[in-house]
Amino acid sequence: MKTYTLTIVLKPDLSAEAQKKIGKKVEDLVSSSGGKIDKTESLGIKTLAYEIEDNKQAGFSRFTLTTSPDKVSGIRSELERDNNVLRVLVLEGSAKGI
């Protein structure tokens, strides 16, 4: 088991309930893969350096999770299929100092 930082970029017009639903989806994906979420952060709406799918702003959420390395690509690909998720970034290690 390794520690990963998962950052997802969401459409800026999502309701709070839709954001919670995506957070719950992340929790379910991680727990079903035998991992656990150590920390969850909502980083709010930020202005993007360039437009993504005609969006000048986006919502950011960050998760620190522990899971098996072979399960990470499955979690990532499942999140990328969600139409409300603009981008997914998975980094090995925790987000200390970010």
Image (tube, grey):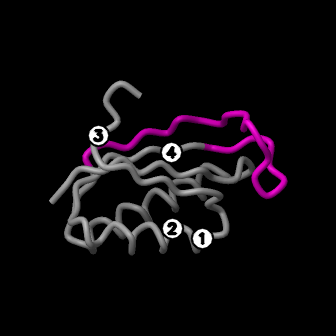
Q: How far apart in space, not on screen, are marks 1 and 2 (Cα)?
A: 5 Å
Name which residue type carries label 3: Ser
The residue singled out by tag 1 in the image is 82
Q: Which mark is residue 79?
A: 2
Q: Residues within 10 Å of mark 4 (few under 14, many from 20)?
A: some
Q: Are marks 1 and 2 in contact (CB under 8 Å)?
A: yes
For the residues labelled 3 and 1, the Cα–Cα distance comes to 24 Å
Residue sitting nearer the eye, 8 or 27 = 8
Depth order, front residue of 72/16: 72
Q: Quadrant of residue 74?
A: bottom left
Of the numbered discs 4 and 3, the one sitting upstream in the chain is 4
Residue on which the image places disc 4: 61
Label 4: element kind: strand
Which circle, 3 or 1, is nearer the viewer? 3
> Residues at badges 2 and 4 in contact (C-beta under 8 Å)?
no
Residue at 73% across / 36% down in the picture?
Answer: 49
Find the distance from the CA under tag 4 to the CA under tag 1.
15 Å
